[in-house]
Image: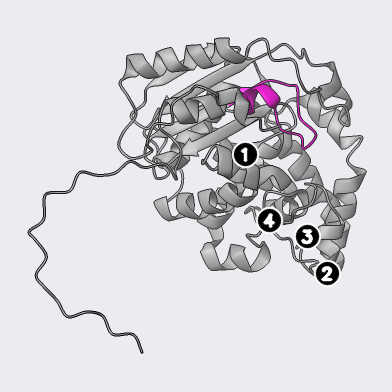
Amino acid sequence: MLDPAAWHGVPQEASTGALPGWDRVEEVVRDAHARYADERRGSVADYIPVLAEVDPELFGLAVIEVGGGLHDAGDALHPFSIQSISKMFVYALAIQEHGHERVREIVGVNNTGLAFNSVMALELNDGHPMNPMVNAGAIATTALMPGATSVEQWERMREGLSAFAGRPLSLDGVVYASEAATNDRNRALGRLLRSYGRLAGDPDEVVDVYTRQCALGVTAHDLAVMGATLADGGVNPVTGERVVSADVCRDTLAVVASTGLYERSGDWLFEIGLPAKSGVSGGIVAIAPGKGAVAGFSPRLDEAGNSVRSQMAVGYLSRALGLNLFASSAVPHPASSPASPSAPLELS
C-alpha cells in the first residue's frame, strides 16, 4: 500500500554523500515513528494461524549506520519471526558458498510479477525459479546450504543469519509448528522443483529447513543490523565481523532491489529508491549501501503482504535522510573557458 501522499511535505534529500550527524538521524527516526503511529490501514496475516494472534498495534523502527550508530524507536526490540526477510540473507550465504555463476544458474534474478507463492510462475519457466525472493526460488536456495544432513544445513544457516544479526538467533517453536502444519503449498513447490530436476535432496526435508529459517526470531533492531552488514560491504558494523564479501552484497542487493517486495517491487523502487525485503509478520528492512539500513515492524499488511506502517515510515526516512539511490543534486562545476569556434555539424 504505497501512498505517495504519506510523504507529502517531506523534502527529498539527495542520496549522494553521507548520513547526517547522529543527533539528526535520532530525531528523524523518532519523528517517523510518531508520524505513522496512528495509521490503522491493513490487516494481520491469517494464513499462518499464530500470526493472526499478534497485537496489530505493535510498531518499531530502527536505523543502524555503517559506522555503528544505533537508533531505535517504539517496539524496535519486540521479537517476531523473520519470515521471508530471511530469503535475502540465505541467498547471500549461498552465493558466498557457491559463487555468483552457480547460484545464478540455479535461481534466476527476474521478477515474476506474480504472488510470492505462485505455482504458475514455476510452471511457466520450465521449473526454473525466477528469483530467490519468491518461495520457489527461496526453497531452491535453501537447498544450497552446506551440510551432509538437513540438521547440519539448518545449523549452518542459523549460524550465518546470527552472524548477520550480531547475536545468536533462535527458532520460535510456536511459529515453526504453526507454519509446518499449514505449509502444503510450499511442500508442493518443493516436489515440483524436484520433478524438474531443480532441487537436490529430499524436498520435504528442504522445505522443513526453509520453514525453520522463516521461524527464526528477530527484532526490528536485528533486521537493521543485518541490513547494515550488507550496506557495509559484508562487515557487521556492530561486531566488526566479516560475514560475506562485498561482491556478495552487490549481487544480493541488486536482486532484492527488483524483487524484494514481490509484485509491488517496481512501485517500491519508484517511490522509495532502496533495495528492501518484507515479511508477512510485519517486518521490512531497506538498505542504503555505504550508509546503513532502516528496519520497521508493524503487523498490519497490505494486499501484497507488506507492512503498511513500515512502508510509510521507511519511505519517510528515505526522503528525510537522503537514502534514495536515484536522487542526486547538481555538483558545482568550475567555470569553463569560452568554447572555441567550430565548424557546424554536418548531417548526412
Q: Which residue is mark 2?
A: 196
The answer to whether 274 appears left or right of 213 in the picture is: left
Amino acid type, callout 1: Lys
Query: For the magenta stretch, what is the residue range?
Result: 296-312
Marks 2 and 3, the one that precedes in the sequence: 2
Q: Is residue 160 left or right of residue 108?
A: left
Q: Position of residue 225 (x, y in %)?
A: 48, 29
Q: Residue at x 70, y 28 (%)?
A: 171
Amino acid on which the number 3 mark rests in the picture: Gly
Marks counted in the figure total 4
Q: Quadrant of the N terminus?
A: top right
Residue 75: give x, y in percent of width and height.
Answer: 61, 12
Residue sitting at 87 percent across and 27 percent down? 46
Is 281 placed above or below 270 here? above
Q: Residues within 10 Å of mark 2 (few under 14, many from 20)?
A: few
Observer able to see residue 297: yes
Q: CA distance from mark 2 to mark 3?
A: 13 Å
Q: Is residue 194 above or below residue 271?
A: below
Residue at which label 1 appears:
277
In the image, residue 298 lies in the stretch drawn in magenta = yes
Residue occupying image coordinates x 52% and y 48%? 253
Seen from the viewer's position, the closer of residues 106 and 74 is: 74
Upstream in sequence: badge 4 or badge 3: 4
Residue 278: quarter of image: top right
Q: Earlier in the sequence, mark 2 or mark 4?
A: 4
- Of pointers 4 and 1, the one earlier in the residue sequence: 4
Res 201 label:
3
On the image, numbered disc 4 is attached to which residue? 111
